[in-house]
Amino acid sequence: MATIRPDGSPQSSPMWFVWDGAYLKFTHATNRQKYQNIRRDPSVAVSITTVDDPYAEFRGAVERIEEDPAGVFYETLAKRYGAPWGYPGDPRVIFFMKIEHIAGQNL
C-alpha cells in the first residue's frame, strides 16, 4: 500500500489484506507513519501481484477506519498469511479501502 507523506512524497510497504466484496481491508498499528498519512490524506494505491495478472494496481481511498483493540482482525490475517507469530499487542485499526480505479494487464 502506498500513502502520501506530509511532504508529498510516497510511502509504500507490503501489507496483509482481504477483499470482503466491497472493500480491501487491512490491519495496521496506530503508532506508525502510514496510519498518520491516511488520517491526513486517505488517498492510497495498492499493487497486487498474482499469477494471472502480475501488474494489478488499485487506487482509491480509505473510507473508514475501525479500532481493533484486541487484534482480532490482525489474527484473522495472520492465519490467512501463515504467520508463525500472534498479535503483537500494539494498538491496531482496520482500514477499509474503497477501490475507485483499477489498472492492470489482464483486467
Image (cartoon, grey):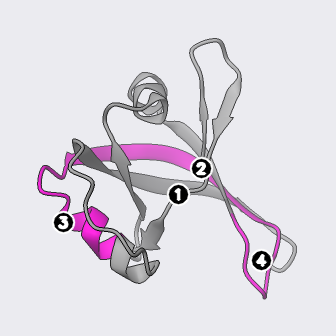
Categorize mark 2 by other alpha carbons within 10 Å: few (<14), some (14-19), many (20+).
many
Which image quadrant for residue 103?
A: bottom right
Categorize mark 1 by other alpha carbons within 10 Å: few (<14), some (14-19), many (20+).
few
Badge 3 or badge 2: first in the primary sequence = 2
Q: Label 3, on which residue?
A: 72
Quadrant location of the C terminus in the rendered image: bottom right
Q: Which residues are magenta?
A: 48-77
Q: Amino acid at mark 4?
A: Leu
Q: Amino acid at mark 3?
A: Val
Label 3 to label 1: alpha-carbon separation: 16 Å
Q: Is residue 23 above or below residue 36?
A: below
Dot 2: element: loop
Q: Label 4, on which residue?
A: 107
Whether the residues at callouts 2 and 1 have beta carbons within 8 Å, the answer is yes
Given this view, does label 3 or label 2 mark the residue nearer the observer?
3
Q: Label 2, on which residue?
A: 1
Q: Report if residue 82 lies within the magenta region.
A: no
Label 4 to label 3: alpha-carbon separation: 32 Å
Whether the residues at callouts 4 and 1 have beta carbons within 8 Å, the answer is no
Dot 3: element: helix
Q: Label 1, on which residue?
A: 15
Label 4 to label 1: alpha-carbon separation: 22 Å
